[in-house]
Amino acid sequence: MSRFFRRKKTDEKDDGTAEAKPVDAAEAESVEEEEAVDAADIVEESAAEEIPASRGDTIPYHSEIKERLMYMFNDSIIGAGIEGTDEFYIEFIAMGERFWIGKAPLGDIEIKTGAMTDQDAHVRIANDVVSALLSAANFSEFSKIYIQYYKSAEAGMFVKIEVRKPITDLNRRGYARVPIMKLLIGSAR
């Protein structure tokens, strides 16, 4: 009922005791139509704004998983907080190649080819999953594919994670804060 009445403040009375004046039916309908049009416009505008936000930032094309991982570690959103980590070393086997990504104390993130002796975790990714991960358009899709094949491995389609140090130590060193590190190792918890 309150939408059919308009409040009108008089110039003399500014103390909040203004009287409500009834509005005729034609005026009430036009007010309702304006409100409905405005609400529809707002919903359309907000939906248009939310589509890119929900999709996430697009990851550029990479031909190798090493390039894609390094891009994500260096990205300001996906790798947010990486500069606050002490040190980390994650070894990967993908596409028949062994490589590791790591950061020395107070150092930069680097990628090296070959085996590593004292890594925090070892991640093995099947070739078909690597192809799917490379085709992911954004971090959200990348995460879904990674977790899907970690949780339900199939023949030739798997992600295997072997954490080689205690989880509490890894969390203290930053694995729980950085989105990409949380994805790579946090899935194994």
Image: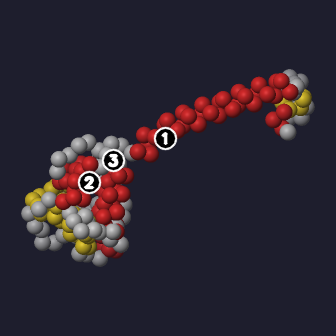
**Helix, strand or loop at mark 2:** helix
Position of 167 relative to 12 (above/below): below
Task: Determine crowd level at label 2: few under 14, some 14-19, many 20+ residues with C-alpha closer than 10 A.
Answer: some
Residue at point 17% right, 51% down? 64
> Is residue 16 at least partly visible in the picture?
yes
Answer with mark 1 or mark 2, whichever residue precedes in sequence.
Answer: 1
Residue at left 28%, top 68%? 154
The picture places residue 13, in percent across and down from the top left corner, at: 89, 28
- Find disc 3 in the rendering and name its residue: 138
Q: Is residue 184 left or right of residue 122?
A: right
- At x 75%, y 30%, the residue is 32
Q: Which residue is mark 2?
A: 132
Disc 1 and disc 2: Cα gap in Å? 26 Å
Where does label 1 land, which residue? 50
Which quarter of the figure is the N terminus placed in?
top right
Q: Earlier in the sequence, mark 3 or mark 2?
A: 2
Amino acid at dot 3 = Asn
Report the Cα–Cα distance between label 3 and label 1.
15 Å
